[in-house]
Image (cartoon, rainbow, N blue to C red):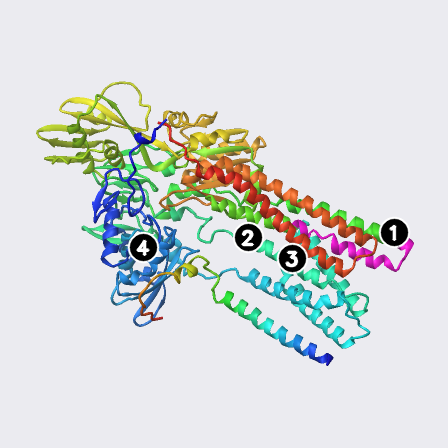
Amino acid sequence: MFRKSEVKPIIECYHCGDECLLPILFNGRSFCCNGCKTVFELLESHQLCEYYNLENHPGVKLKEGSDKRFLYLDREDVRANLIYFSDQRTSHVRFLIPQMHCVSCLYLLENLSKMNSAILQSQVDFDKRKVNIAFSHDLVSLRQIVQLLTEIGYEPYISYNDLQVKEAKNPNRKIIYKLGVAGFCFANIMLLSFPEYLGLDILKDPEITYTFRALIISLSLPVIFYSASEFFINSWIGIKNRFINIDAPVSIAIIVTFLRSIYDLLTNSSPGFLDSMSGIVFFMLLGRYFQSKTKDSLDFNRDYKSYFPVSVNKLTVNVETPLLLNEISKNDILRIRNLETIPVDGILISEMADIDYSFITGESASCRIRKGALLYQGGRVLGESVDLTAIKQFDKNAFVDLWNSTAKNSKLEHRSVIHQFSHYFSYAVFSIAIVTAIYWAFIDSKKILDSATSVLIIACPCLLLLASSFTNGFLISLFAKYGLYFKNYLGIERMAQCDQIVFDKTGTLTMDHSMEVKYIGIELTEYEKSLISSIASKSTHPYSKSISLLLMAQKKITIQEVNEIPGEGIYAVVNNQIVLLGSKNFVGDTSQESSLYASEVYFKIDQLIKGRFAISQKLRNNIAVSFKTLEMKKVHVLSGDKTESVKEVLSKIPISISYKAACTPMDKVEYIKELSGQGSKVIMVGDGLNDAGALNWAYLGVSVMNENFSFSPGSDALLEGNQMYRIPQFLKLARFGQKTIKIVFAYSFIYNFIGLAYAVTGHLKPLVAAILMPISSLSIIFLSFFALKVYEIKFGKLKNVNILQSS
Amino acid sequence: MVKIIILLLGVSLCVALFFLFAFLWSVNDGQYDDEYGPPRRILFENKKQNIRK
């Protein structure tokens, strides 16, 4: 175990909060990298240091990428689609910036004018992660604005769809209007009903009584014809499709209450039940609204187009012109830079290329391609930039075909168990009403109508609807608080019903861009460490960075000659020694033992191979510990990677896992189909395009969002990558949620019984209903709230557990 | 005498209706779209900006 004195104090970057392995000092503050320091300098020079005062470490790490990728923003057609308003001098543009996460982001993005006076005003809609910028288009171009945003770490997310279609603004506010009207009418009707309950006599004050009753009836009209309309519409749709959903008995109850009340008021037999009716409509609408709130800024329906950048640069005689993806034609020469995605299949023109296909195939090792060979759409370029000749247009590639073939006709519209339950409930209520009517027919026929309608009024499934919608609403926000975002509440129900879980490996169980490096071989001298670091720093390959970080060498050694060969290694000459850093082949190692690791970088100095850096993917935080509590019949891992890689990663997780390696995307779909065919309900957790099909075919698809906000395939739920370890907890919560709904249902039966006792005996007075309704509704809401709150307190205890990483 | 209460009722309903319309208008105007920004924005210390719409 670690003793406190053994652990070095961690220096956090002043800008982004990451650990500074090699702190860069500036102005008395430490930064983890040059990027962070640059942003700090920039903000300081514009007097925007309040950014750092509002929140600790608010900074966003800069993404690597060249400025040339923004060339397309100078195009007229692109500008026309992005700018939503323009007059003589100013233009307005709206960007989606998913990186904003705190009050400092809000501050900085609303003070852009301080950084460039040509920006007149910028306003943030934080919930949607959007910023509206008004600027003088004569003084600053759209491209310069995007470049500025990128320089401070807030690169806008511009998708293909943004460039095709003008943004249609259509917020769904209808339900809030209905809520407002229902609430207003409910409160006033209640107010106006009480005098009659409490002694207002129609004989003594006829004028007042009639006025009150007239007002009550007029106030109830908007409720039944406007606010309650969605219940009627939904139940009608259900009946047309030969299905009785829960809106059906609710609608009947509302209509019966309304008619009975009008009749009573007009015949002077009672004050009517309009207050209870409008109250229950209000509460049910509130529940519905609450249940439908999902995170505005997330898109659950991303298709493959969102994976690609919107433009690629075409080379014509050494000049780069930006092309939109649908403009790429056969034989265009395209230049793709480090970490950019290949937009179409093509033939390599450059000497060598190092391509990462992990998002498509799941293979974590990159591919070395020589000049003249094929490059496939969707691969990511590593290291030096690459030129290729396009052989197909964007829409005509195998990739797109693959995507389309793994899509399924949309999941059968999942019917919530509540709707199935409403069947039984409706039959029960009608039976009771009929029995009551028959009973009173023999005893006292005057009471038939009274008792029968009372039964229909009070035995309202409204309480059931309330119970489920509020519990679902609380569940959605509880899950969201801990990093799991559902498309809608039905996903929670599905999650609770699943008994098997399938994970993808690369990017899902393992971190997307972090790697673990181990050195195996003859111990390196300090000189050698500095040597390797200096050489590695000349390369942009991701492995180089990881190696430098491992060595933590201080000195920089000047290198006489250095030459990086993509996909093979680096050749350098230092102090007249020849140094090679690269693949086994590159350094000439001929030993036959197969590698246990995803990749190895060998180190050879002057004919001696001293050792190698074994690079394996890092498992996500805390998974090894937390997955021990995973309660599933079976756990599976599917990967496009080779068996050794999969085994290596699985060895770090101490539970029994079935796995299948070297899976193509179709293999994954078949695996899921097979499990489903055996009667299992399967959760699929994946992050890449090679998982998109499996995500569609699983009972519940969970897509993993990476830290750098890049593409996640569309699915039923989105999970923040660093919350992966909470999956066992999430499963338990989903199951507990279903139990809670059942408990609250049972509780609501108490009110139904009490009310029914009054109704069946023909004694249901409006006063009784008016009291029962708010008490039952509010107590149900509080019960579900507290049940989940208590659970969260127990569950939340795991939030702050400091789990020491093993190894 | 009795009619006073009816008059008062009418007036109070009108006032309440006014607030209902104010609520509906503010929702339509988009004032409830962002719940995070407005409370924090007013706490920023800023020199007066020259805002041109």
Query: Which one is in front in this view, the residue at disc 2 or the one at disc 3?
Result: 2
User: What whole-number distance in Å separates the C-alpha atoms at marks 4 and 3?
Assistant: 48 Å
Q: Chain of mark 2?
A: A
Give the position of the N terminus of chain A as an image quadrant: top left
* Disc on the earlier residue, 3 or 1: 3
* Disc on the earlier residue, 2 or 1: 2
SS for dot 3? helix
Name the amino acid type tagged 3: Phe
Contact (CB < 8 A) between labels 4 and 3?
no
Task: Read off the magenta span.
Answer: A440-464
Give the farthest residue toward the top: A592
The percent position of residue A603, horizontal first and vertical second, equals: 20, 26
The percent position of residue A81, horizontal first and vertical second, equals: 36, 61
Q: Secondary structure of the magenta portion, mostly? A: helix
Q: Which residue is mark 1?
A: A439
Q: Chain of mark 4?
A: A
User: What whole-number distance in Å separates the C-alpha atoms at marks 4 and 1?
Assistant: 75 Å
Looking at the image, which residue is at 64% across and 65% down?
A187
Q: Which residue is mark 2?
A: A292
| Residue A245 visible in the picture | no
User: What whole-number distance in Å separates the C-alpha atoms at marks 2 and 3?
Assistant: 15 Å
* Disc on the earlier residue, 4 or 1: 4
Contact (CB < 8 A) between labels 2 and 3?
no
Name the amino acid type tagged 1: Tyr
Compared across the picture, whether A279 is left or right of A43 comes to right
Q: Which residue is mark 4?
A: A51
Give the position of the C terminus of chain A as an image quadrant: top left
Looking at the image, which residue is at 63% across and 73% down?
B13
Q: Which residue is mark 3?
A: A231
* Disc on the earlier residue, 4 or 3: 4
